[in-house]
Image: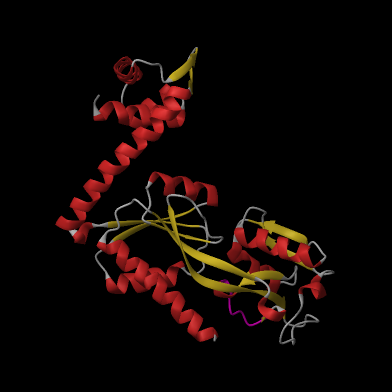
Amino acid sequence: MELLQLQYFIAVARLEHVTEAARSLHVTQSSLSKTIQRLEEDLGAPLFDRTGRKLRLNEFGSRFLRRAEKALFELEQGKQEIRDLSILEHSTLELAVTTASTLPNILREFRKKMPNIHFHVQMLATQEMVTLLHRGEVDFCLSSPPIQGDDIECQIVCIDPILVAVPKGHRLANRKSVSLIELRDEWFVGVKRGYGTRDLVDSVCKSVGFVPRYVYEGDEPARLSALVEAEIGIAFIPSTARNLREYIQYIPVDNHELAREIALLWHKSRYISRAALEFREVVVEYFGAISQQTI
């Protein structure tokens, strides 16, 4: 069994399409098909069910895929460890986030400490991020909500109060705090369902007796402040994401009953480079400083 066979098999297994897999690997379809056929001969079992040009991973293939991914994962970790030991200056930190409001400040602090380290950041939906975590393709994820898993290490780094953003002149603008039930007749602007903060807010509001009514639902959290300022609706905005605009008032919720958790995630088996360890320290220190400011 050859390493190339495993690499080709994983590509085909993930896509279940020879043409697309060949394109992604930059090889011909015939070469790819022959390699997969040799692998199946070596194993003594078919890995795919074939219907015309369509492929579907069968039970043999599903079981072998898990093993093959683990094998390549360990080899990649070995390469990463050797690279890290030999030339730190050319390391690249792979990051994925579901919450980006604090990221610019964190990256700025990290760059101060390690100016020669490159980083690559992806803004992803929760499930996409989980997939990359399981594959060991990212060093760290910054996520809200936290994610639990057998192979995922989850460190809560911040309890982030969610505030009510209202335009100046709103009936609640001068309040020091507000109860959720007082908001039951308001119109809201927010992000779409599936975003961690939106799902959390809807759940907590429902538990106190109402469902928020949205006049705007989008996929750009940063746009909400402008909509509140324009008096389109009020919004639930995490404390770390508030935009200190002149015509917006941010009001805490009574008893801090509405807050999100921000977590730093990493694969338990992935090799953690010196650059990644430094990044983790920067994240913990950054959120620690924020917590001190709010005490």
> Where is residue 97 shown, x and y percent of the image?
47, 58
> Where is residue 49 shown, x and y percent of the image?
48, 17
* Nearer-the-camera pick, 216 or 12: 12
Residue, far right: 185
Q: Residue at x 62, y 62 (%)?
A: 197
Q: Quadrant of residue 203?
A: bottom right
Is 165 positioned to the left or the right of 117 in the image? right
Specify the segment rendered in magenta: 241-248
Name the magenta segment's main secondary structure. loop
Residue 97 highlighted magenta (yes or no): no
Q: Residue at x 34, y 15 (%)?
A: 44
Q: In the rendered image, which quarter contains the N terminus?
A: top left
> Where is residue 72 shown, x and y percent of the image?
30, 38
Is 27 positioned to the left or the right of 53 in the image? left
Q: In this rendering, is residue 210 above or below 128?
A: below
* Nearer-the-camera pick, 89 or 150: 150
Q: Quadrant of residue 36?
A: top left
Residue, far left: 86
Is 289 positioned to the left or the right of 229 in the image? left
Q: Residue at x 17, y 57 (%)?
A: 85
> Where is residue 271 shown, x and y percent of the image?
29, 53
Q: In this rendering, is residue 1 above or below 101?
A: above
Residue 247 highlighted magenta (yes or no): yes
Q: Quadrant of residue 222?
A: bottom right
| Residue 125 visible in image | no
Q: In the rendered image, which quarter contains the C terminus?
A: bottom right
| Residue 133 visible in image | yes
Q: Residue at x 67, y 71 (%)?
A: 258
* Nearer-the-camera pick, 103 or 225: 103
Instruction: State how many labels appear.
Output: 0
